[in-house]
Image (spheres, rainbow, N blue to C red):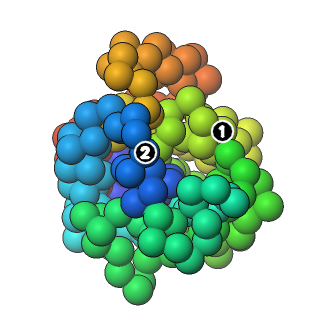
Amino acid sequence: MDLKKKNTALLIIDVQIGLFRKKTPIYSELELLKNITTLITRSRTANIPIIFVQHSNKSRLIEDSDDWQIHPQLACQSSDVFIRKQHGSAFEETSLQNELDQKQISTLVITGIVTHGCVRATCYDAIKLGYEVVLAQDAHSGFNQDDGVYIEEWNAKFAAENIVLMPTESIYNLL
């Protein structure tokens, strides 16, 4: 697979400050942030669009609040695309599909939080909509302390749904 020859975008789901402030910490949060940052850096070098998805709700992730903001380690830029969502899937009632169509994107490299929630819903919807999905298998996470096993179980489920799983390093080398 050569991601350079395809119309590829990096999709980063819900890596927002408020999720890092919860009582239950994100599993392997330092590795998660390092891997996502690695993919962002490589995408910028390769001129691959970077799309940040931000979840909004009425409790922790109130739109435009400090908790709603993208984690500062990811160093967003004004050239990035920002999608606001209120549902699990980044496609549901958002402008994401329109943004992808305008940029003629056919392949999505997906990272983010929470594996069994918004990452899952977005991956499954992307497949249904005809996108090729590459999930960075070491750049998605959740809040369970046993998430190492849990993530591996989800990775197997994703693979069964025609989602390509790759470690960050392999994706980096293909971009």
SS class of the residue under badge 1? helix
* Nearer the observer, 85 or 171: 85
Residue ID at (68%, 47%): 89
Q: Residue at x 66, y 39 (%)?
A: 121
Disc assigned to residue 110: none
Circle number at residue 22: 2
Asked if residue 51 shows in the view, the reply is: no
Question: In the image, what residue occupies the spot 30% across and 68% down?
Answer: 72
**Which quadrant holds residue 27?**
top left
Left-right relation of 147 to 65: left
Mark 1 crowd level (few <14, some 14–19, many ≥20, 10 Å Cα): some
Confirm whether residue 147 shows in the render: yes
In the rendered image, the vertical position of residue 165 relative to residue 173, given as above or below:
above
Q: Is residue 171 above or below residue 144?
A: below
- Left or right position of 164 against 157: left
Occupied quadrant, residue 90: bottom right
Comparing labels 2 and 1, the label whose residue is closer to the camera:
2
Check disc 2 and report its element: helix, strand or loop. loop
Name the kind of residue labelled 1 in the image: Ala
Query: How many residues crowd mark 2 within 10 Å: few (<14), some (14–19), many (20+)?
Result: few
- Residue 54 rendering spot, x and y as whole percentages: 55, 62
Amino acid of disc 2: Lys
Residue ID at (60%, 42%): 118
- Residue 74 position, x and y percent, is 29, 64
Give the answer, above or below, for where 125 lies relative to 107.
above
Reading the image, the residue beneath label 1 is 121
Q: Please, which residue is most extreme toward the right here?
A: 93
